[in-house]
Image (cartoon, grey):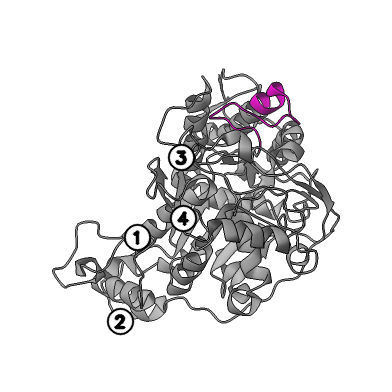
Amino acid sequence: MVTSELSNNHHHQHISSNNSPMAKPNSRNKNSSIFLSDGCLFLGGALSALVLVWGFSSFTTFPNDTLNFETLSQNDAASSRTPDLTFDPPDKTFFDDPQMGYTMDKKVRNWDEKRREWLKLHPSFSAGARERVLMITGSQPEPCRNPIGDHLLLRFFKNKVDYCRLHGYDILYNNALLDPKMFAYWAKYPVVRAAMMAHPEAEWIWWVDSDALFTDMEFKLPLERYKGHNLVVHGWPHLIHEKRSWTGLNAGVFLIRNCQWSLDFMDSWASMGPQTPNYEKWGKTLRSTFKDKFFPESDDQTGLAYLIAIEKNKWADRIYLESDYYFEGYWKEIVGTLQNISEKYTEMEKGVRRLRRRHAEKVSESYGDTREEYLKGAGFSTGSSRRPFITHFTGCQPCSGKYNAMYSADDCWNGMHKALNFADNQVLRNYGFRRPDLLLNSVSPLPFGYPHP
């Protein structure tokens, strides 16, 4: 089946107001995007051009399914903050089970127990396991049709590598279609599923679309905030439960716990995909449930909204709909603020000697903590002085070049260039350089003590 990036080349914008310290009044939604090509595509686009007025909801915590990492660490004095990559004992684990498989059709049972046993046999991975994150992103198997598409995807990937290096996260880049029947927006789930099996040491799997980038290299996931939850997505409960809107969440960036609940949930989620005989039926069901869904195919984003709304008692308590910061932000409302934010950070550094101090890149997190003290009153809303965490170029389609007609080519390409350079300046700073102009690639060395008070 041939699928086009253009078929998913839409976006949603949402506007609301909230004055809470973590509030993000202006946001939008899109269908999850990943691998796109002329054959089986890893989508990078969004799905609608609606303007909605959305609000926010409070958060509730629930009992946690996660492993008892404290017990694992206490039971073995050999636990270390530095995992031993050379040690793999001969004791049998789930890896030695011929029935265990990496594909979506291979059911996994007692996964929490199997992970726990593996960690016991590999004690050096126990310490810090609660916060261990594996980031996954990817692109299509074939070269991009857009002449500069592969270059742009390389820069987007570099940005993610930089972020992971700064915060000690592992990263996986996949450009293989692991299940040819699970095309378009469904293609990422076989990758996430296989990664859970391949990385029992990781507590969280963090999917980030290829056309999304980190524009705050210092901000770190507030994992303690998600204690008791197994899936984190950008969304608004009242839009799903009350409005029955398929744009009530965004599946392009999500954080999922490596546990049995998640495997079971993904089985239910993927049962709506194109690899099943009920694909067309699910398309009709989703469209009848969410009246604002205007396209007939069963997609992952609406499928997720369905599971939250219709199977609420089974799944919703463990899903955290994040709306208080830019867990995944709409590029159109962000790009125009970047220059002003850069200037505000420069003024901040002029008044704080520690933020001007040269330091090793490995200790950058401590300087981020220092900066946070001066950002407490900034909030997370559009127009604040705080850098947006993740900027998502929905509808720009960097690989195919078939951007949404509601944008101009200059909007997309200049916006991506500016955001990528804005993020890269935060990295180059540790190496003594910066780009004075966000639209230009040329760099300048930084004088000692920059910026001077």
Q: What's the residue at 59%, 26% (across, down)?
A: 401
Label 1 to label 3: alpha-carbon separation: 26 Å
Judge whether residue 220 can be spotted in this image.
no
Label 3 to label 2: alpha-carbon separation: 48 Å
Q: What's the residue at 67%, 64% (across, down)?
A: 321
State whether residue 20 is above or below residue 207: below
- Residue that numbered label 2 is attached to: 75
> Looking at numbered disc 1 in the image, what kind of residue is underneath it?
His
Disc sitting over residue 40 in the figure: 3
Q: Position of residue 203 (x, y in %)?
A: 43, 65
> Looking at numbered disc 4 in the image, what kind of residue is underneath it?
Tyr
Label 4 to label 2: alpha-carbon separation: 35 Å
Disc sitting over residue 199 in the figure: 1
Which of these two is toward me, 180 or 111? 180
In the picture, measured across the screen, residue 234 lies left or right of residue 37, that is right
Dot 2: element: loop
Magenta-colored span: 395-414
Query: Which numbered disc, 4 or 3, marks the residue that appears first in the sequence?
Result: 3
> Looking at numbered disc 3 in the image, what kind of residue is underneath it?
Cys
Label 4 to label 3: alpha-carbon separation: 14 Å
State whether residue 220 is above or below residue 99: above
